[in-house]
Amino acid sequence: MRNVDFDYLSRTLANLSGIPVRVYSNDCRICYHSVVNLPEDPIKLYKNELFSVENNVGYFITPRFHIYGIVKSGEYRIIAGPTAQITTDEQSLRELAFQIDVSKDDRQTFVDGMKSIANLPLESLMMMLCSVNYFLNDEKLELSDIAISNDELLQIKQQVEQQRTEKVYHSAQKQPVHNTLQIEETLLHIVRHGDSAALKQWISTAPPIRAGIIAADQLRQLKNTFIVTATLTSRAAIRGGLSPEDALSLSDAYIQRVEQIETQNEITNLQYSMILEFTEQVEKIRKGNESSKLAIEAANYVRHHLSEPIDTEAMAKEFYLSRTHFSAKFKKETGSTLTDFIHTEKTDEAKRLLRYSDKSSAFIGEYLGYSSQGHFSRVFKKYTGLTPNEYREKYQR
């Protein structure tokens, strides 16, 4: 390989693209350049997946739809990213900061830095890296030459109950042509009410979908059907209480992802994952009840501010009400005090983090906006009957 100044190359790429670029020699990072300030490099969550890419040019999409591009040349590996085709919401970025152990003092800097990274379509990122590959490896590649290497889709496969999903789309039962209306109404009712248990039960016994012909080939037919499903389920989720911004962003991200896959199996699994995620998002807001409009709006507010100390005065202002009027109205419509509601939401999130992450209870409490470990422990025990450490010992898998 020619003598390459990787520091110069990575700095130029970062400045031109507006996304972080780092260079590894074997397993050791030798260069890092970024036009934004990130106190911690988010690549640490996905280094194993990125290093498993075998082709000279490849990419990886994270569960939050962040994209990383990779170019290999001998012992060297250039990794550009993260970038995204849509803007990531602030709460998701705070969750990412939590996962990579960004300190409390640096968390807002990290969130602001991530929001400042340029949004690049996957195709644009790959074209840029194909040019770098030509310079490093003397290999001309086009987008059509780059094999899909999306480990995230493999994770979805593992999470989805394959036999159940195949029953929806490949059952041998005889059904009339265009049976989609009844199936659609049943499915959208489930999504709108956030009933994930009903969804799983329905999937196990649902008839096959026999849609009309909306494309000239089978793959395009599946993708078009997926796009229609994404549109309908996102609207059902909005009617169920999910904020339009969250629902439409999630829909856009899934549609962009389906365009990157090329097999029927992957599309089927992705479609099930999408419907389930919309249903679970609504379920989290509604908690399985016919919640009042105020409760749904309050739930949306809290879930977007989970990692902050929530000031009920500021929250009331969001609804153009005084704190006293807002609290009284909330109690009348929901039967719960506003303070209880906020702590219940935060406690539910704390339980999830205690069960499925290795973060300390002190770090989790600080992330959720509590003023001290003692305050967090007292609140958690009030709503669960256990201290955070007792809960983790009992339930962590």
Image (cartoon, grey):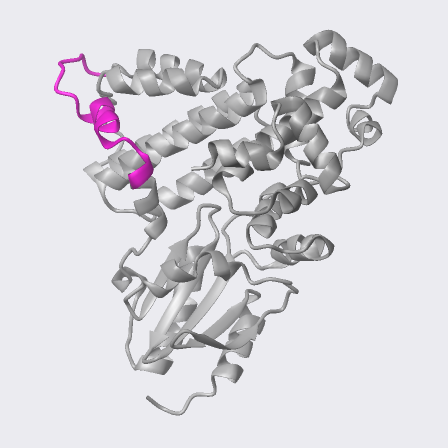
Q: Which residue is rendered at x = 38% and y = 15% of the image?
A: 198
**Residue 73 at x, y = what percent?**
34, 78
If the image is split into quadrants, where does the N terminus sit?
bottom left
Residue 200 relative to residue 106: left or right: left
What range of the chain is rendered magenta?
158-178
Q: Which residue is rendered at x = 55% and y = 50% of the image?
A: 99
Residue 30 relative to residue 115: left or right: left
What number of labels is visible?
0
Q: Nearer the viewer, residue 297 or 140?
A: 297
Task: Say if residue 217 shows up in the picture.
Answer: no
Determine whether 46 is above or below 378 in the image. Answer: below
**Residue 34 at x, y = what percent?**
59, 69
Q: Nearer the viewer, residue 82 or 370?
A: 370
Residue 318 within the magenta-colored segment of the rendering = no
Quadrant in which residue 201 is drawn? top left
Q: Which residue is rendered at x = 59% and y = 28% of the image?
A: 348
Q: Nearer the viewer, residue 199 or 308?
A: 308
